[in-house]
Image: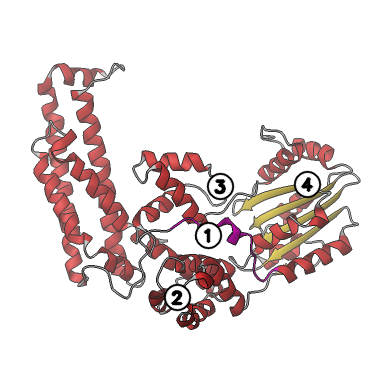
Amino acid sequence: MAELGGMLAAAILKVVGDQIGSAIGGQITLRKNFDEDLKKMKMALESVDAVLEDAERRSITDKSTCLWLKRLKDVMYVISDMIDEFEADTQAITQPSTRKLSFKKYLAIIIPCLTIGPKITMANRMEKMREDLEVITDQHKKFKLTEGTNANEPKVTDIRETSSIMETQIVGRADDKVEILASLCESMTEDITILPIYGIGGLGKTTLAKMVYNSSQFKEYSQVWVYVSQTFDLKNIGNSIITQLSEKEKESEYTEIQMIHKSLQKLLAGKKILIVLDDLWEGEDFHLESLTDMLKVGKDSNVVVIVTTRDEGIARKISTIRPYKIKSLTDDMCWSIIKQKSAFESRGGKEHAEKTGKAIAMKCGGVALAAKSIGHTLQYIKFSEWESLRDSNIWTVSSLKDTSSIQVIASLKLSYSIMPSYLKLCFAYCAIFPKGHKIVKEELIYQWVSLGFSTWQLGDRCISQLLGLSFLEHSNS
């Protein structure tokens, strides 16, 4: 979202400021005239650094401030790319590698005067970029931003790793699990039983599906978990089921539906199978019919399918038994989650914060994800700062037409807004992955480290922190 993008400005400024600092009088040795431009750029960034916290807070409700932060962020990206390019060109000339160079590069090395043209071009680019930056940074004066941090504004300077014990304690879904298992028990004599769980995002549909999936009632069943997502791909769904049932290391890659059906016929025949299709969005009748047809191909099989979806229409179309509408949590349940996540009971002076904590729980609107995210954030700020979070205008600001989702977005925005800058940057990088993508932890940390966002040790902590905040979650398979 644009508002969250604006909140990245401070984190990006630090990275680019460090990059400019290292470049001044450093690696760009052949560009002596650039030092002055680089120094002026650094001064321009320093002039807005002091007011960025206030700007980021305002950007949530003020479109003009949000637009200014976006422009500042965009120009910093360009500056970063430009410095990388200049340093790469300089290194190629001063420290030519043994790799084969282009003829133009080779001539530039042996005949230095040929680099005068490119040098002038680079100088012009550097000067223009400095001027653009100064224009943008000067614009902050019209917003009358205040320097430093608001004393009443909560700010997390660091986040410790979370306890895995807390993750196993699920609040308020035991009765739902019993109801679903009872409903399935009455219908599992059929060849295929499809029970959808539907409701707004963040209520706990996936959590409830996991509880059913891990129930002892299905211990004799072969089990499959497929994340479907907004992009409905019948072949991917079929290949995922085949891969998990065949238990082969190599993933199934059938390109024809007929081949998928043939393989599933063998794998499903005469077996008890539990399949979870998580986060189904597609509502077209022919797609849903094709999906159910694919799951019915096994002869003498007993297939139970749990579907999670936000769409009641999809739930009713695909179901073979009555769909289950997941209910909102009570305010007391949300408060229980917040207490868990914030380690409330183990903290001193908690008596004075309970009233504020319960008020925050009410703002979660019965949405489990909202309570989990805000609860984890509360763990790392002082009780005296809870009131500021309770009274934040983020709770009431939303561009969403679906007002039932406001609480989720608000809680995630609040958690994001007071993240340490390094964590904002690492999380923002995750936007390159599509929703539901399985990220290999070590590969993600390696990318963060290579981009200069973190060290390896810090990257490992970032993963734990984002899991605790419910910004990432463990893969089911």
The mark lying in front, picked from 2 and 1, is: 1
The CA distance from mark 1 to mark 3 is: 15 Å
Percent from the top left, x then y, of residue 107? 18, 17
Residue type pointed to by label 1: Ser
Depth-wise, is mark 4 or mark 1 nearer the camera? Answer: 1
Residue bearing mark 3: 437
Mark 2 and mark 4 lie on one chain; the one further toward the N terminus is 4
- Relative to 226, residue 419 above or below: below
Residue 470: image tag: 1
Residue depicted at x 56% and y 74%: 404
Instruction: Give the side of residue 40 with respect to residue 149, left or right.
Output: left
Labels 2 & 4 near each other (Cβ < 8 A):
no
Front-most of 457 and 197? Answer: 457
Residue indicated by mark 2:
395
Task: Residue 405: tell me if it is visible.
Answer: no
Q: CA distance from mark 3 to mark 4?
A: 24 Å
Q: Amino acid at mark 3?
A: His
**Residue 294 — which label?**
4
Secondary structure state at the residue bearing disc 4: helix
Examine the rendering and report whether any part of residue 284 can be seen.
yes
Q: Are marks 3 and 4 in contact (CB under 8 Å)?
A: no
Residue 317: where, in percent of width, then height? 75, 62
* Magenta part of the chain: 160-173
Label 3 sits on a secondary structure element that is loop
The amino acid beneath tag 4 is: Met
Comparing marks 3 and 4, which lies closer to the viewer? 3
Report how many numbered discs are placed on residues in the image: 4
Q: Is residue 215 magenta?
A: no
**How much space separates mark 2 and mark 1, taking CA atoms?**
18 Å
N-terminal of the pair, mark 1 or mark 3, is 3
